[in-house]
Amino acid sequence: MSRPTRPSRFWETLAVVIVKPLSWLLIKKDWRGGERIPRTGGIIIATNHLSWTDPVLLAHFLYNNGRWPVILAKATLFRVPFLGNAVRSLCAIPVERGSDEAAKSLHESAARLKDGAAILFYPEGTCTRDPDLWPMVGKTGAARLALESGAPVIPVAHWGAHELLPYGEKRPRLFPRKTFRVMVGPPVDLSAYTGQEPQADVLRAATHDIVMAITEQLAALRGQQAPAAPYDPAGR
């Protein structure tokens, strides 16, 4: 059965009418590398996570570059009145964190990829806890999805959403107007894992490659040298 890769015309129009004007009003834009995003076919957009606002700002960037982002969202959002219906209608995929149900989101993502969706994936699983806001050690879901589906992984780094709304805060910092910067890299080379069973060591290695590809783009975007290894909150 075909799965939706973008919402109905009503919900898409409603989202665009609301999000795009707000985005243009609230932030300045420095977008680079959008031509590297394939316009057709199933793809995985792997990106860093800095703020609760960056999914919306990234959605605007991806939409302007020809792709409707299918976002993996916390399942609790789907149970909020009206908001849940909106999130579901915008083709988001629910993720039940910390339960056996979490694997269902990967199965749903794989089905959407087959139908040509662009899956927006945060390998870290949450906003970074790195003191300097570099990407953390990633969870293996994006790597598993990529290796099992064969879909290309496009690394996308962004910077500036945390200045608009720092993680954990509820009140945005509107002034002075912030700049949302985006850098798209070439597809992550995962050919070294072709034909290998998706065992834990393979998935961890592929995940590391994905996170480091995002980090490389973020370093170029920030004009700074990235750390040699991603921050690990469990082993700090």
Image: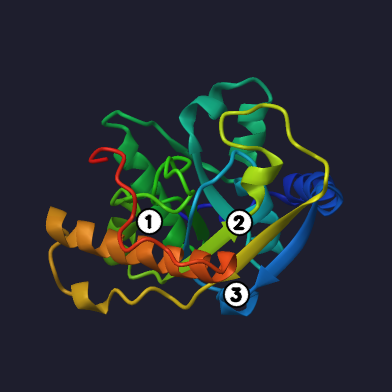
Give coordinates of residue 176: x percent, y percent. 83, 46
Image mark for residue 39:
3
Instruction: Say above or below: 156 vs 187.
Output: above
**Cα distance in 3D space between marks 1 and 2:** 28 Å
Q: Single out the mark in the foreground, 2 or 3.
A: 2
Count of numbered circles in the view: 3
Number of other residues with Cα within 10 Å of mark 1, as a class: few under 14, some 14 to 19, many 20 or more: many
**Quadrant in the picture for residue 212:** bottom left
Give 212 or 70, whichever is nearer the viewer: 212
Q: Single out the mark in the foreground, 1 or 2.
A: 2
Give coordinates of residue 20: x percent, y percent. 80, 52
Secondary structure of the residue carrying tag 1 is helix
* Residue under pointer 2: 159
User: Which of the marked residues, 2 or 3, is nearer the chain's N terminus?
Assistant: 3
* Type of amino acid under label 2: Trp
User: Which of the marked residues, 3 or 1, is nearer the chain's N terminus?
Assistant: 3
Instruction: Say above or below: 233 vs 35.
Output: above
* Type of amino acid under label 1: Ala
Give coordinates of residue 220: x percent, y percent. 53, 71
Image mark for residue 110:
1
Q: Where the C terminus falls, by quadrant?
A: top left
Camera sees residue 199: no
User: Relative to 193, is 184 on the left or the right?
Assistant: right
Q: Residue at 74%, 44% (x, y): give it.
A: 11
Secondary structure of the residue carrying tag 2 is strand
**Cα distance in 3D space between marks 3 and 1:** 18 Å
Give coordinates of residue 210: x percent, y percent. 36, 64
Image mark for residue 3:
none
User: Relative to 100, is 176 on the left or the right?
Assistant: right
